[in-house]
């Protein structure tokens, strides 16, 4: 049996103001930083130990990971960063308000863009300043892999490729792995690990700053899954991830 821990970053500034984020490199809010520190304390209290950590190229996930490792006195372990764990690219929606977009296009269309398996958000064009090729972080990513928009389907391809090449061999070698990433890059991994259908994944929402613990069998199939933290708090955060319009605040 193996154990794997996934953590979505703590609340970001754009989660707080309810803007489509994707690859925009926004920081954690003060609340998000606290969520990350609290996640680290929960993991420490639960006697978790990690040998190696993975995160994206985006500071909200990187900082979340460092707050967690700091709380666990594990800042020394190897940390691997990759664009392949970045959030799903939200195309031309990036920076727009989710509420205003729902008023303009209807809630059903926005839910398709947010949670469906294969509906692509409107695409950027290469002249757009948000085109990732303009960002030095992505200088080593081939043109053919730089997204202008992504659905969950495209996100799964890059996440699964990284999982198969880099993360899976470490787990099979007996390393305790933690992955700090994003709502949709983690939904991509959860869909793959749990072999969920394209319909089942629509209803999966991953809460911010809440460790998701998997026990995996020798074929890395999940045999147990739970969130660390009080059931009530986790349930509230899952509902908030599904409906960020602050109705639940
Ligand atoms: O804006 C985003 O990039 C994501 C994650 O915060 O939002 P959503 O809940 O719409 O997938």
Image: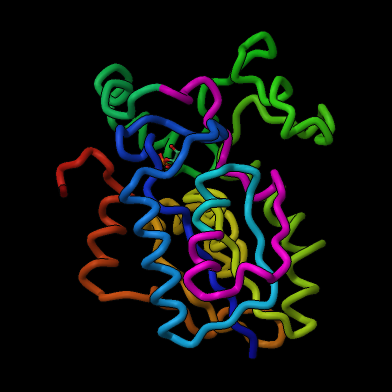
Up/down of 140 relative to 104, above or below:
below
For the view shown, which residue lies furthest in the top direction? 127
Of residues 122 and 171, the one nearer the viewer is 171
Residue at 31% across, 58% down = 238
As drawn, is 7 to the left or to the right of 238?
A: right
Up/down of 114 relative to 235, above or below:
above
Q: Quarter-wise, where is residue 36 in the image?
A: bottom left
Does 90 appear in magenta? yes
Residue at 65% across, 44% down = 57
Q: Quadrant of ligand 1?
A: top left
Coloring scheme used: rainbow
Query: Looking at the picture, how far across and down is residue 123, in whole percent?
Result: 58, 20
Give the position of the N terminus as an image quadrant: bottom right
Of residues 6 and 158, the one nearer the viewer is 6
Query: Looking at the picture, how far across and down is residue 199, in whole percent?
Result: 46, 53
Q: Which residues are magenta?
A: 66-95
Query: Looking at the picture, how far across and down is residue 218, in whole percent?
Result: 70, 87
Query: Looking at the picture, how far across and down is residue 85, in whole percent?
Result: 64, 50
């Amino acid at each position: 049996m193996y154990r794997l821990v996934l953590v979505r970053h703590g609340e970001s500034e754009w989660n707080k103001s309810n803007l489509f984020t994707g690859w925009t490199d926004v920081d954690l809010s003060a609340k998000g930083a606290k969520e990350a520190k609290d996640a680290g304390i929960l993991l420490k209290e639960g006697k978790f130990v990690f040998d190696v950590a993975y995160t994206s190229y985006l500071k909200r996930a990187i900082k979340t990971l460092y707050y967690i490792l700091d709380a666990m006195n594990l800042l020394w372990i190897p940390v691997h960063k990759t664009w392949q764990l970045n959030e799903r690219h939200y195309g031309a929606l990036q920076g727009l308000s989710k509420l205003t977009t729902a008023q303009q296009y209807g809630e059903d269309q926005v839910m398709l863009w947010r949670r469906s398996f294969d509906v692509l958000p409107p695409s950027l064009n290469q002249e757009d300043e948000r085109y990732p090729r303009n960002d030095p972080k992505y200088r080593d990513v081939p043109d053919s892999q730089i997204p202008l928009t992504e659905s969950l389907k495209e996100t799964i391809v890059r996440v699964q490729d990284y999982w198969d090449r880099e993360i899976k061999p470490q787990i099979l070698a007996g390393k305790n792995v933690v992955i700090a990433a994003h709502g949709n890059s983690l939904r991509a991994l959860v869909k793959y690990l749990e072999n969920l259908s394209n319909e089942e994944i629509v209803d999966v929402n991953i809460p911010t700053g809440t460790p998701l613990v998997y026990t995996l069998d020798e074929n890395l199939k999940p045999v147990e899954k739970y969130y660390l933290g009080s059931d009530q708090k986790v349930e509230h955060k899952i509902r908030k991830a599904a409906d960020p319009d602050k109705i639940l605040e």
